[in-house]
Image: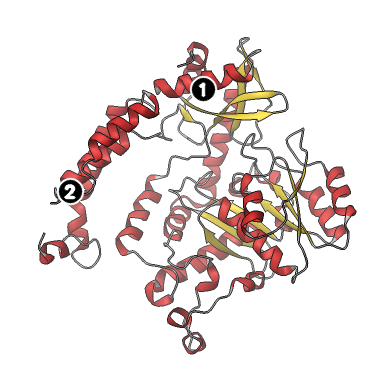
């Protein structure tokens, strides 16, 4: 294609919206047709069938001559949609994989079109300011009354946990940092310790699903002079359980330990007037991981790491003369390199800021309340069916259940059978009592009939 023709395909500039508009129509049509082709929460046939269909649509991957934007969009977006696990389908409930709000997805388009990069002010003037404002506002929800609450935008809970461990390591000033966590902690805590060259975390058993303050007390007492980071969880991946945060904060205060709370799942309870008390003690943490592409209904990625005082982020400061030269900073240009370990960084804050303005705290809180209520409704339905057994009443929006008396092999095979037929997407979770099916309800529009049909599918399921 001639250069002049290529220029007319750019998304930015004064002509960008005109170039985008017809392509958006093509994309929306392809989304519609692809969902109809799929006909359920997941494509049927398993990995082999999906691979065959995807290869048929995607080849040739790099043709000698382009086929044009509309053909490429129509073909590949349709194939992607037909082969997607659709979290907006009420029977797609395996993971912390939310259906994004339309307003957030629309805002994300603007970021893609403008392509600001938050590694220097001259690439993202307004985005840098919007990020600073929105991060402070969210940090104030986590740490009300703190001296200077602040937050960093991350790619999710994994990056937030890694940053928390990094900050704790730097605060130890060269002394070996000891990390204490529960067996219920997210796997990213162990991975972050490995990436940072720290010793593997001292992992406490959590047979009840949450940290036991008595065990934590013993662990903190064992080496009182050593810098220690305690990692607690507000919303575990397997069950949605919340550790006893006030007791753990008391123990950290008494032993001089640092407290990090991984609230990637449960953090948005802060928006709810009815459920926010479950996060009592969150404000006493030195660092808190949040993740709004879970209970925040944002397109990924939308993570944050909140701190009570922006001074805690000083160890992340970094200089690169072409991005944050000293004289530019002295002249008043904001220094953005200390806001992330990444250099090129997308303006993921826009979709978050638009959502907060569009729905407000109460609107988001209502959505949180709804999905948690749906979880209790599903638990009620499970308990009403003699052929099923419930693990426990839900804390957040996760429900564990299984056919009564089913062993691990039968539960795993049942789940795979549902996936193979494309009729339901359920997760799996292991507890001391065995293996369970996991339903993580993040769709606020789900109806009671959807939940009943989901259990009907489980009751009729057979291995693939």
Residue under the point 79% across and 49% down: 246
In the drawing, what numbered circle is on residue 74?
none
Assign the C terminus to one quadrant of the image.
top left
Q: Is residue 293 above or below residue 33?
A: below
Residue underneath mark 1: 415
Image position, residue 409 (x, y; %)? 59, 19
Residue under the point 24% across and 61% down: 11
Q: Answer left or right for 463 relative to 422.
A: right
Residue under the point 65% across and 63% down: 166
The answer to which of 265 and 133 lies nearer the viewer is: 265
In the drawing, what numbered circle is on residue 63?
2
Q: Is residue 423 visible?
A: no
Image position, residue 41 (x, y; %)? 40, 28
Please, what secondary structure does the residue beneath circle 2 have? loop
Q: Residues within 10 Å of mark 2 (few under 14, many from 20)?
A: few
Assign the N terminus to one quadrant of the image.
bottom left
């Amino acid at each position: 294609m001639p250069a002049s023709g290529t220029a007319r395909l750019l998304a930015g500039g004064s002509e960008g919206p005109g170039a985008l508009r017809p392509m958006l129509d093509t994309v929306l049509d392809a989304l519609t047709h692809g969902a109809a082709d799929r006909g359920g929460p997941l494509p049927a046939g398993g990995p082999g069938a999906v691979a065959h269909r995807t290869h048929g649509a995607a080849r040739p991957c790099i043709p000698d001559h382009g086929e044009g934007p509309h053909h490429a969009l129509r073909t590949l977006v349709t194939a992607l949609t037909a082969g997607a696990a659709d979290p907006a389908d009420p029977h797609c409930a395996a993971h912390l994989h939310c259906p994004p709000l339309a307003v957030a997805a629309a805002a994300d388009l603007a970021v893609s079109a403008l392509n600001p990069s938050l590694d220097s002010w001259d690439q993202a003037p307004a985005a840098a300011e919007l990020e600073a404002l929105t991060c402070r506002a969210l940090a104030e929800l986590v740490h009300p009354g703190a001296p200077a609450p602040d937050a960093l935008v991350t790619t999710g809970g994994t990056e937030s946990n890694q940053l928390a461990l990094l900050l704790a390591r730097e605060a130890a000033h060269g002394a070996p940092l000891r990390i204490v966590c529960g067996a219920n902690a997210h796997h990213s805590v162990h991975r972050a310790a490995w990436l940072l060259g720290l010793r593997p975390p001292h992992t406490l058993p959590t047979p009840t699903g949450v940290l036991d303050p008595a065990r934590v007390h013993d662990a903190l007492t064992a080496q009182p002079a050593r810098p220690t980071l305690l990692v607690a969880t507000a919303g575990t991946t397997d069950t949605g359980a919340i550790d006893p945060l006030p007791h753990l904060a008391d123990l950290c205060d008494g032993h001089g330990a640092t407290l990090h709370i991984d609230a990637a799942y449960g953090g948005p309870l802060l928006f709810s007037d009815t459920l926010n008390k479950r996060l009592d003690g969150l404000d006493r943490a030195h660092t808190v991981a949040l993740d709004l592409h879970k209970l925040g209904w944002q397109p990924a990625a939308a993570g944050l790491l909140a701190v009570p005082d922006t001074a805690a982020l000083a160890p992340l400061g970094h200089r690169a003369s072409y991005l944050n030269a000293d004289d530019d900073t002295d002249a008043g240009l904001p220094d953005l390199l200390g806001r992330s370990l990444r250099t090129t960084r997308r303006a993921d804050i826009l979709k978050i800021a638009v959502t907060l303005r569009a729905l407000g705290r109460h609107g988001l809180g209502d959505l949180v309340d709804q999905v948690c209520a749906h979880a209790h409704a599903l638990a009620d339905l499970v308990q009403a069916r003699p052929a099923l057994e419930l693990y426990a009443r839900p804390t957040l929006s996760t429900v564990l259940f299984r056919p009564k008396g089913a062993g691990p092999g039968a539960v795993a095979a049942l789940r795979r059978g549902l996936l193979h037929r494309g009729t339901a997407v359920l997760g799996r979770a292991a507890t001391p009592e065995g293996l369970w099916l996991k339903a993580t309800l993040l769709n606020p529009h789900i109806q009671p009939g959807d939940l009943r049909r989901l259990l009907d599918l489980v009751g009729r399921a057979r291995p693939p």
